[in-house]
């Protein structure tokens, strides 16, 4: 995943890809989500998303924080 983010070079694209990855993982793999490894992976990705969101423009921060809050519920 980081390889594709690196090719983009765009911070907004990085946040979009990370949010999509976490959303897809949580929605498509509910049985595997019981695994501690997967839960820890998702927690690290959410932490990374929060850091990356803080580097974006204020308007984009608000939009992506709303998306992230929907995923965390």
Image: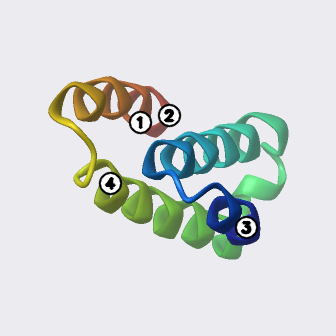
Residue at 71 percent of width and 58 percent of height? 34
Q: Residues within 10 Å of mark 2 (few under 14, many from 20)?
A: some
Q: Which residue is mark 2?
A: 71
Q: Earlier in the sequence, mark 3 or mark 4?
A: 3
- Identify which residue, 34 or 57, lies in the foreground: 57
**Could you give the CA–CA distance between mark 3 and mark 4, rounded to whole angstroms?**
23 Å
* Along the viewing direction, whichever of 49 and 28 lies nearer the viewer: 49
Q: CA distance from mark 4 to mark 1?
A: 8 Å
On the image, numbered disc 3 is attached to which residue?
Answer: 35
- Quadrant containing the C terminus is top left
Please tell me which of labels 2 and 4 falls first in the chain.
Answer: 4
Q: With 39 as the anchor, is 59 left or right in this view?
A: left
| C-alpha span from label 3 to label 1 | 21 Å
Nearer-N-terminus badge (3/1): 3
Residue at 61% over, 69% down:
41
Say what secondary structure mark 2 lies in.
helix
Q: Which residue is mark 1?
A: 68
Image location (x, y in percent) of residue 14? 54, 52
Residue, x 74% and y 71% (percent of image)?
3
Residue on which the image places disc 4: 50
Asked whether 64 or 31 is in front, the reply is 64
Q: Could you say which disc has been placed on residue 36 in the image? A: none
Is label 2 or label 3 in front?
2
Looking at the image, residue 59 sits to the left or right of residue 45; the answer is: left
Q: Tell me where residue 40 sits by quadrant.
A: bottom right
């Amino acid at each position: 995943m980081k390889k594709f983010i690196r090719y983009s070079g765009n911070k907004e694209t990085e946040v979009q890809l990370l949010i999509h990855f976490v959303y897809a993982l949580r929605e498509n793999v509910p049985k595997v989500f019981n695994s501690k490894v997967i839960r820890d992976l998702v927690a690290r990705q959410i932490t990374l998303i929060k850091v990356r969101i803080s580097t974006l423009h204020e308007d984009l921060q608000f939009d992506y924080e709303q998306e992230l809050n929907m995923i965390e519920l």
